[in-house]
Image (cartoon, helix red, strand yellow):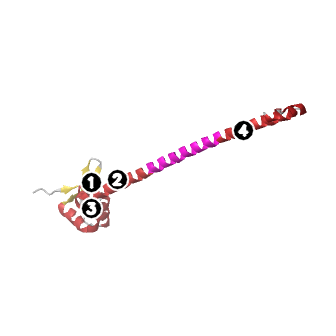
Amino acid sequence: MTDTRYTLREAAAEIGSSASWIRARIRAGQIAKPQQVQGPHGKEYRLSAGEVEALRNLYPAKSRRSADTRIARYMEHEAEQQDRLQRALLAIAAAEARGQAERERAERAEAALAAEQERARMEQKRIEALKSLTVFDYLRGKHKTL
């Protein structure tokens, strides 16, 4: 009968924890030091099924997350991200609309100012024309036509 050996990642996935949590339990002496084997990147721990079960008993039940729980949390996170993105896009659209309204208001103000300047120019021209009239022009009523 072969004894199944788990890597830290496999054991972590089995009990719903992380490899770093298992390493911390090993360093703390809460479980017997597991077998070390030469792996592709150096020495690696290999845990027996009994050691994995001991870790399962150490891992708090409330901390265990099933795959469904993790998926649900991921989906909630994605929904929140989408909601934040949607709000940001709406804020950008509102800011662009406000900017467009401000540009239109500025254009109307510029047009009104140009019209007022034209009226002032025409009034100044009329005043200059009135100043150039002589007494005879007034007697002839020319000032009424300006």
Q: Secondary structure at mark 4?
A: helix
Using the rendered view, name the quadrant where residue 30 is placed: bottom left
Judging by the rendered image, the residue that carries numbered circle 1 is: 44
Three-letter amino acid code of the residue under disc 2: Glu
Question: Residue at 78% across / 37% down in the picture?
Answer: 124
Q: CA distance from mark 1 to mark 3?
A: 25 Å
| Range drawn in magenta | 88-111
Disc ID at residue 78: 2
> Marks 2 and 4: which is nearer the front?
4
**First in residue order: circle 2 vs circle 4:** 2
Judging by the rendered image, the residue that carries numbered circle 3 is: 65
Q: Secondary structure at mark 3?
A: loop
Q: CA distance from mark 2 to mark 3?
A: 18 Å
Using the rendered view, name the quadrant where residue 23 is placed: bottom left
Question: Residue at 26% across / 64% down in the picture?
Answer: 64
Q: CB of mark 2 within 8 Å of CB of mark 4?
A: no
Q: Secondary structure at mark 1?
A: strand
Three-letter amino acid code of the residue under disc 1: Glu
16 or 23: nearer the viewer: 16
Q: Does the magenta stretch mainly form a helix, a strand or a loop?
A: helix
Q: CA distance from mark 2 to mark 4?
A: 61 Å
Disc ID at residue 119: 4
Q: CA distance from mark 4 to mark 3?
A: 78 Å
Q: CB of mark 2 within 8 Å of CB of mark 3?
A: no
**First in residue order: circle 1 vs circle 2:** 1
Task: From this view, report whether residue 41 is shown above or below residue 142.
Answer: below
